[in-house]
Image: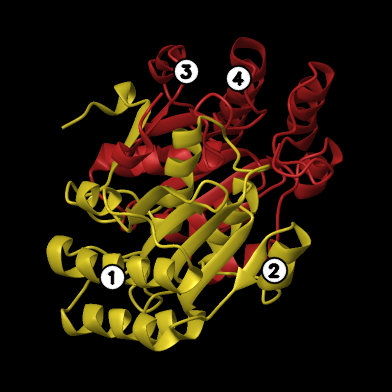
Chain colours: A yellow, B red
Amino acid sequence: MHHAESRTDIHLLQPGWLKDWLGRPAPTDDRGRLEEVLALAGTNIIRAGGGPFAAAVYDLDSGRRLSMAVNTVVSNQCAAAHAELQALSLAQQVIGNHTLAGKSCVLVSSSAPCTMCLGAIAWSGVQALVFSSTRQDVEKIGFDEGPKTPSWRRELEKRGIAVLGPLLRRQGQQVLTLYQEQGGVIYNGPETPHH
Amino acid sequence: MHHAESRTDIHLLQPGWLKDWLGRPAPTDDRGRLEEVLALAGTNIIRAGGGPFAAAVYDLDSGRRLSMAVNTVVSNQCAAAHAELQALSLAQQVIGNHTLAGKSCVLVSSSAPCTMCLGAIAWSGVQALVFSSTRQDVEKIGFDEGPKTPSWRRELEKRGIAVLGPLLRRQGQQVLTLYQEQGGVIYNGPETPHH
């Protein structure tokens, strides 16, 4: 066990098998990118028992995939370890800058953002967001999306971030249903707060 | 430079001098805790050139200070490296659980939360929030607090999180003014988005 008084760094680890995914060629359109992210979310349920969420950042100028991430709240003992927040943070660390502004980066996410990730997207400098399942889909299986402003899409667009979604919604819903069928933990549900 | 395809972990480092602060006895009331956090925010400006924000988590049952954190957005090349999000994540990793629920923990922060940290607080399992300066104070020096719902206090209270603030607001404002006087970077200002 770590001694509380000496803990001054946060280390968030993605599962080891994610490296295989990062070695594959990056898809070249929104649909292909979202399919890859949804497949990753499904794999996180099956292989890691993690939350049914995945995200990735692509640089449209270079065609490079900058980062991929899955939800690791439980494995990393960190409530903030959502897929989107980590995909954005990894992309920033890859380019060596706290902002993705000035590039042409898109965040592709299996679900619409929760309140926290909405803020993380606003601060990230990303140029676009593409997502599959909606707040209603996510809340239907028990997760709480938080105190998010109803005008969140407009708020992102005001900040120069284009929002596209729900796209491939049925596939996104299937990933959420899979999690439910597997008896996945609803670690922040409204009925059992914060678990 | 790191190779994009191999980056799967996020490492957020607090400044080395924070260890000295963590060795001090924990204050025993809200005012003392907030004074310590405001002093820490001021120190982050002077010693590290970091954002004028600090936060800490205290366990009221044991009297222990579980974590302290300063804003490290620029030094860690990570837009999400806000003080509150890191203080909560460090506290969770210290107790070895993704949630602080079931304890009596308070998050003490130099400022009211931005949109992202509002979400992080909702997911953290913390029981109370104490803050000093307000959204208006923070926006006055150029920062954008994001698309936060106006009913954010009520939303936290609905989730069982007590909210106390602004407390010691004048001291909180002085920290923000100090940052402005030192020519601190407004890394997510609305005028120069995401810089």
Crowdedness near tag 2: few (<14), some (14–19) or many (≥20) residues, C-alpha within 10 Å: few
- Residue type at the position of mark 2: Ser
Circle on res. A39: 1
Q: Nearer the viewer, mark 4 or mark 2?
A: 4
In this rendering, the answer to whether B181 lies above or below A132 is above
Spatial separation of the CA atoms under disc 2 and disc 1: 36 Å
Place of residue B39 in the rendered image (x, y in percent of width and height, measured from the top left): 62, 21
- Residue type at the position of mark 3: Pro
- Residue type at the position of mark 1: Ala
The answer to whether dots 4 and 2 both sit on one chain is yes
Circle on res. B151: 2
Place of residue B32 in the rendered image (x, y in percent of width and height, measured from the top left): 57, 28
**Residue receiving disc 3:** B15
Spatial separation of the CA atoms under disc 4 and disc 3: 9 Å
Residue A84: name its quadrant.
Answer: bottom left
**Residue receiving disc 4:** B44
Circle on res. A181: none
Q: Nearer the viewer, residue B178 or B81?
A: B81
In this rendering, the answer to whether B131 lies above or below B177 is below
Q: Are marks 3 and 1 in contact (CB under 8 Å)?
A: no
- The reply to whether residue A40 is visible in this rendering is yes
Q: Is residue B42 left or right of residue A6?
A: right
Q: Nearer the viewer, mark 2 or mark 1?
A: 1
Q: Are marks 4 and 3 in contact (CB under 8 Å)?
A: yes
Q: Are marks 4 and 1 in contact (CB under 8 Å)?
A: no
Secondary element at image label 2: loop
